[in-house]
């Protein structure tokens, strides 16, 4: 389907993505953690997994400095709504024995996916920020009981899948498991908008953005469509009002803004 031309009227920060302007970077927020009181040392931190909601998750491994047993803990952090530094993480896993490797698989809007050992787990936050932990699957049995178990994430934001590949115990094959985010993030993250039509028949779509959250304008020929089509590239929120200007001519389309 041919998409109409999209003109974006955004704030100064968003316009920094234009090629004609330079881009700068500066410190936004921080979080500090100290193991001194526990008598432990941080020995390793996994690569960070950043979410579209402005949050970030990673795994910290600690030890006692004598070569003894190590422990892992997941930290999930996001700045406050005003963009300032958080006082505490959104959620932590608590210190886990290092008998099975722990890593973050994906971070979505108010949703963290990770695995520890052979257990695949999911953490969701409700509107009050209360976390709910759920074990999605434990990889066991002859067909999926070998090593390694490898997780990956489809890059598309919707519908969104997590895939896991596990070798068989006898090493003669493997099993692929697909896990779908349900409901799809874009469906549960529809953003309230206000619209107006100008004299040139253009449609202005405005919404209040949140710092660090990615948004996208989507279109469909019907309101009952399961697969809305992206009209714009993802736009990072700045905490300001964002206005998108769209041609309201043919063909007739419905529009929505979603937080990815």
Image (spheres, grey):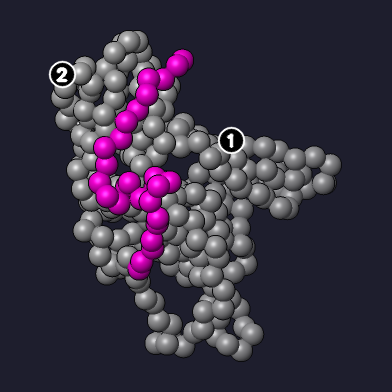
Residue denoted by label 2: 199
45 above or below 128?
below
245 above or below 50?
above
Q: Tell me the quarter of the picture where residue 196 sits.
A: top left
Residue drawn where x is 71% and y is 48% of the image: 145
Residue sitting farthest toward the front: 20
Quarter of the image with the C terminus is: top left
Number of callouts in the render? 2
Residue drawn where x is 80% and y is 40% of the image: 173
Q: Can the viewer see residue 258? A: no
* Tag in front: 1 or 2: 2
Residue drawn where x is 26% and y is 60% of the image: 83
Residue drawn where x is 32% and y is 47% of the image: 14
Closest to the observer, 203 or 33: 203
> Is 106 covered by the magenta stretch?
no
| Dot placed on the residue nearer the N-terminal end, 1 or 2 | 1
**Which residues make up the magenta segment?**
1-27
């Amino acid at each position: 389907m041919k998409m109409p031309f999209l003109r974006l009227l955004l704030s100064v920060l968003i316009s920094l993505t234009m090629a004609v302007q330079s881009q700068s970077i500066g410190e936004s927020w921080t979080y500090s953690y100290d193991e001194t009181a526990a008598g432990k040392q941080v020995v390793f931190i996994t690569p960070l997994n950043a979410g579209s909601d402005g949050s970030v998750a990673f795994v910290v491994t600690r030890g006692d400095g004598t070569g003894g047993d190590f422990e892992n803990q997941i930290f999930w952090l996001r700045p406050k709504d005003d963009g300032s530094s958080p006082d505490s993480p959104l959620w932590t896993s608590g210190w886990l024995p290092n008998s099975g490797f722990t890593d973050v698989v994906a971070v979505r809007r108010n949703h963290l996916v990770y695995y520890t050992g052979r257990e695949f787990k999911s953490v969701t936050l409700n509107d009050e920020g209360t976390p709910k932990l759920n074990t999605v699957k434990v990889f066991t049995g002859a067909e999926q009981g070998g090593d390694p178990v490898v997780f990956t994430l489809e890059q598309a934001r919707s519908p969104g899948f997590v895939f896991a590949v596990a070798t068989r115990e006898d090493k003669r094959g493997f099993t692929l498991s697909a896990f779908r985010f349900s409901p799809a993030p874009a469906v549960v993250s529809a953003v309230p908008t206000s619209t107006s039509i100008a004299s040139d028949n253009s449609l202005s779509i405005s919404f209040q953005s949140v710092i660090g959250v990615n948004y996208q304008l989507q279109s469909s020929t019907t309101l009952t469509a399961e697969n809305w089509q992206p009209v714009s590239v993802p736009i990072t929120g700045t905490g300001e009002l964002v206005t998108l200007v769209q041609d309201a001519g043919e063909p007739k389309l419905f529009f929505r803004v979603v937080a990815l």
